[in-house]
Amino acid sequence: MDRIVKTLTWNKDYLEIIDQTLLPLDEKYIKIKTIEAVWEAIRGLHIRGAPAIGVASAFGLVLAAKKYKGKNKDKFFSIFEDNISYMKTARPTAYNLFYGLARLKKSAYENYRKSIPELQDIIEKEAEKMFDEDMESCKNIGENGSSLIKDNINVLSHCNAGGLATTGFGTSLSVFYFAWDKGRKFRVFVDETRPVLQGARLTTWELKKAGIPHTLICDSTAAFLMQQKKIDIVIVGADRICANGDTANKIGTYNIAVIAAYHKIPFYIAAPLSTFDFSLKSGDQIPIEERPGEEVTDLGCIRITPEETDAYNPAFDVTPAKLIKGFITEKGIFSPKNLFTLKKI
Amino acid sequence: MDRIVKTLTWNKDYLEIIDQTLLPLDEKYIKIKTIEAVWEAIRGLHIRGAPAIGVASAFGLVLAAKKYKGKNKDKFFSIFEDNISYMKTARPTAYNLFYGLARLKKSAYENYRKSIPELQDIIEKEAEKMFDEDMESCKNIGENGSSLIKDNINVLSHCNAGGLATTGFGTSLSVFYFAWDKGRKFRVFVDETRPVLQGARLTTWELKKAGIPHTLICDSTAAFLMQQKKIDIVIVGADRICANGDTANKIGTYNIAVIAAYHKIPFYIAAPLSTFDFSLKSGDQIPIEERPGEEVTDLGCIRITPEETDAYNPAFDVTPAKLIKGFITEKGIFSPKNLFTLKKI
């Protein structure tokens, strides 16, 4: 299978991304040539989704590293470290951002004795390797999860954990793509995912491209569908998974996990190893990004609430491991209690 | 206390309503002179909220009845019955619509021997009585429920069960108004209530007028707040309550009831007796209105999803009695198990 969408493409001098804030109305690609522009693209949700953020931020660091034309290695590393610190401030929750930067840092320091041009090349190759690994991981997630999609079932998705959230294949949507490719027939109920509407704008766009039957619903309609036994399984993505299995994902995910448990519907997380943060014991340690209230009070440029209405807009929530039946990863499906075996890998 | 808003005002020749589709951006009042225009105003959500629909539809029937200038009583009653049948088709779920029309029908037939002008007068007086009763009921609901609002708590509201949903005082919001008037300090978390955003547009507007502190949230954020112990009580309105306590209300209400139960947070319904349909044994008998998918796929006039995306848009859901701690009515607070005592009243 080809990738569903060219979410991000590396071109040596620039990173090309599809501007996700304009989808589905406009399919526009933008060229990004500086680390600052990558930072802005991530902060402004032009590129989003934990795995995509991880790879994009790595290329941001590559763009900055390649700019150094001097010969002072201490200065090169000093700037390199500054850029890592800067890039880390783009968004706080998705672990892949920190994972990607840490990998580039490690590969650079492991080759400290090499020349600066060699180091620049090593860093770039490491980022390219991350890109390829993400693509491969997503395909394996799709393959591993596809057995969960039985014929004639209805699945629930939240936010966008598709090609757009990764290098081009998706995590939870990859599961649907592989199941569909194997001839399984099913329908995806797509949570619109307020406030930024990643479900309504992005997931519908991908599923339409893939030809998979789907129905858009308001987030609060999912419980009503579950009550009527119209949802058989829930599969969502993740932004950060702790050692005990507690999982940060798009706001509303915890709500779904609770209602799924109430209706005895299996709830799965699909994510690559790059989203697992084994340094955190439990979910209360995950920093939760709070975004501007205007994402809630305004629709597009139109204010829909009275002036001065305050909105509370956390971008993520944390689902405790006990509500999660399994993690669909590139290494197989693991229950929260078996995550320690994944840590060893 | 004065009523919060002139939701609907009867002026003998016309019904004046505030156009709720334009709030909060525009505060515009419209004069309605025919039953067809009342029907359209209800179907198009220019006036909404079960008690307000009940009273408005009664005045719609009055407008039609007063139009008859002939002397043939059989014809008068035949047209009257036709208009009742027509008015019933405006929206299917809110019981108050049927309750109001049934009351007018009963008072007309009880006075069958009177002259047509007398009958027209009797019907009008009955509608005016319903208006006054609704105002009184809402105040009593507010008084009866206010003891539930302790100092320094956070309450969760969904949709708009305020002055705008009634003749001008509200059901669940009346509880907040009375508690605030008694000096209780508290904060209301306002669910935005997709897709029509009655929370974001209408409840915020009312609470701002009343000076009650409030914070707008996306519907799916409520569970996250509950997880953090930031919600102490949930009070919502109702569109129809069955004999066993099963309750239809705005889509998303069932979701809230489930997450409230999970977090052991008391969940209350505030509604007048006119919303109780003792003829229905349980919630599976309540007809649920399905509204156009465009309410979900479009924001204002802008399509936000790919063309041809299907949306499923039920306007209501049914919360089973077992998830409801109590019904706040004008006659006091009743648990689902004690509803039979209310039936006797």
Image (tube, coloured by chain):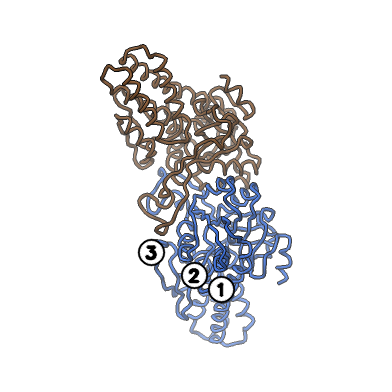
Chain colours: A blue, B brown
Q: Is residue A220 left or right of residue B69?
A: right
Position of the C terminus of chain A, as image quadrant, is bottom right
**Circle 3 — which element?**
loop
**Which residue is identified by label 3?**
A26
**Circle 1 — which element?**
helix
**Chain letter of the residue carrying label 3:** A
**For the point 37% across and 31% down, which residue is it?**
B86
Image coords of residue A178 (percent x, y): 57, 68
Instruction: Judge whether A152 appears above or below B45 on screen.
Output: below
Q: Amino acid at mark 2?
A: Ile
**Chain letter of the residue carrying label 2:** A
Q: Earlier in the sequence, mark 2 or mark 3?
A: 2
Image coords of residue A175 (percent x, y): 58, 65
Closer to viewer: mark 2 or mark 1: 2
**Which residue is identified by label 2?**
A4
Q: Amino acid at mark 1?
A: Met
Q: Which mark, residue A135?
A: 1
**For the point 33% across and 30% down, which residue is it?**
B35
